[in-house]
Image (cartoon, rainbow, N blue to C red):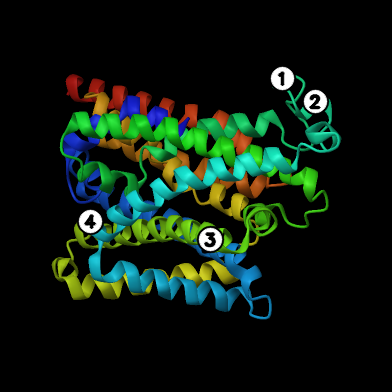
């Protein structure tokens, strides 16, 4: 959903803009001060994203060395990612991304096929999931205890307004040959990513047939590979997962380093050795956050999006609505941050804060930006 929205709304626009950092849009379209604020908000969000990715590394590869703590495992793997990513920078990220993606295209169908094979015995999915979970019925599943469709609806809305501002996607769009290439690349990514995620989710569903007592759902992928794959193939499978983790983390790190250099006038940060120090610092912060702040990966990943959602009106209006003003953008960002943080604090995760945050907050962000921009224009004409 998020990449489809990205394709239709900003893929061509980002390539047309073609800068070093996505936050530069806010500086050039509105004001340098708003550009710096946007950069701070995106960097804050990416600190949260990176921490969850590092936590994922520990969960994925921890079973290989059960005697070693997850903190040590994730730390060692972070160092490996740094060793691969630092020498080549963005070029290494793009090349690794291509290789990892091709290997993933082979791994996911394999895991799905094995899931169908091993899960074929007995009652299959009907033995572990009731009828209400094996159909798509938004009304009946609206408040389903396993996965409320209400929650799914909020995620669809949130991904639409967060993917468009993702700095690591922006970096890859800037590297595209032209607007047509950028548009087609994201469009194909939307289709393939949907198919890959759907395949993994279905495979994980069949894992429930084989392993009904899975302790932690976050470990479904490594458990599937450990249970279904033979020894030699298992190692290759985990290598594919590490390649995906490498490109994700390295992409976030290089995007953050580029933002630090481009958005705050730090000229010396554009030198390679300074960039590497910045990346090392960011990697250390991500490791610390993953060890001490991240408990549930999905919950923290969603929470980290609050600053990104706040930028949604200013970004889309910056590309598509010439009447948007700097004051309207400032107000919309402030409303977005206050509403998102307020929803989390007042409603909380147990109360389902994502619903008021997404379903009321996003319209409020856009409404505040539009109203203030129109009033601002009217005041200017009256003067």
Q: Earlier in the sequence, mark 2 or mark 4?
A: 2
Q: Earlier in the sequence, mark 3 or mark 1?
A: 1
Q: CA distance from mark 2 to mark 3?
A: 34 Å
Q: Marks 2 and 4: CB-CB under 8 Å?
A: no
Is residue 267 rendered to the left or right of residue 193? left
List the residue tagged with mark 2: 132
Name the residue: 46% across, 37% down. 193
Task: Residue 263: give its label.
Answer: 4
- Disc 1 and disc 2: Cα gap in Å? 8 Å
Q: Which residue lies under the disc numbered 1?
A: 137
- Frontmost of labels 3 and 4 is 3
Nearer to us in this view, 273 or 336: 273
The image position of residue 91, as x and y in percent, is 23, 58
Depicted 383 relative to depicted 38: above or below: above
Q: Earlier in the sequence, mark 1 or mark 2?
A: 2
Image spot of residue 274 (x, y percent): 21, 74
Q: CA distance from mark 2 to mark 4?
A: 50 Å
The residue at the point 58 percent across, 67 percent down is 61
Picture quarter with the C terminus = top left
Label 1, label 4: how many angstroms apart (C-alpha)? Answer: 46 Å
Figure quadrant of residue 136: top right
Q: CA distance from mark 3 to mark 4?
A: 37 Å
Task: Classify mark 4: helix, strand or loop.
Answer: helix
């Amino acid at each position: 959903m998020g990449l489809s929205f990205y394709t239709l709304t900003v893929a061509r626009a980002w390539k047309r803009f073609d800068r070093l950092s996505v936050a530069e849009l806010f500086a050039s379209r509105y004001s340098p001060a708003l550009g710096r604020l946007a950069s701070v908000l995106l960097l804050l969000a990416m600190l949260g994203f990176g921490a969850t990715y590092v936590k994922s590394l520990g969960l994925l590869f921890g079973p290989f060395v059960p005697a070693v703590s997850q903190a040590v495992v994730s730390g060692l793997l972070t160092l490996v990612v740094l060793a691969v990513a630092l020498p080549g920078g963005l070029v290494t990220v793009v090349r690794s991304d291509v290789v990892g993606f091709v290997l993933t295209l082979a791994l996911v169908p394999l895991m799905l096929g094995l899931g169908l094979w091993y899960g074929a015995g007995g009652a299959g999915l009907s033995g572990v999931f009731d009828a209400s979970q094996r159909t798509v019925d938004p009304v009946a599943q609206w408040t389903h205890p396993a996965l409320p469709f209400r929650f799914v609806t909020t995620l669809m809305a949130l991904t639409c307004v967060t993917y468009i501002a993702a700095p690591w996607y922006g970096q890859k769009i800037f590297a595209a040959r032209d607007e047509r290439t950028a548009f087609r690349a994201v469009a194909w990514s939307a289709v393939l990513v949907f198919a890959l995620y759907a395949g993994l989710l279905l495979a994980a569903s069949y894992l429930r047939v084989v392993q009904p007592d899975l302790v932690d759902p976050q470990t479904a992928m490594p458990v599937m590979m450990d249970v279904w794959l033979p020894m030699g193939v298992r190692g290759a499978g985990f290598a594919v997962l590490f390649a995906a983790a490498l490109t994700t983390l390295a992409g976030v790190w290089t995007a953050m380093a580029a933002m630090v250099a481009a958005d705050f006038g730090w000229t010396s940060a554009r030198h390679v050795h300074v960039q590497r120090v910045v990346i090392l610092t960011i990697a250390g912060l991500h490791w610390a956050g993953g060890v001490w702040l991240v408990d549930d990966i999905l919950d923290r990943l969603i929470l980290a999006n609050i600053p990104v959602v706040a930028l949604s009106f200013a970004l889309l209006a910056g590309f598509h609505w010439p009447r948007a003003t700097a004051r309207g953008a400032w107000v919309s960002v402030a409303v977005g941050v206050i509403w998102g943080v307020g929803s989390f604090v007042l409603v909380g995760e147990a109360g389902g804060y994502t619903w008021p945050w997404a379903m009321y907050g996003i319209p409020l962000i856009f409404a505040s930006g539009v109203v203030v921009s129109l009033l601002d224009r009217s005041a200017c004409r009256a003067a």
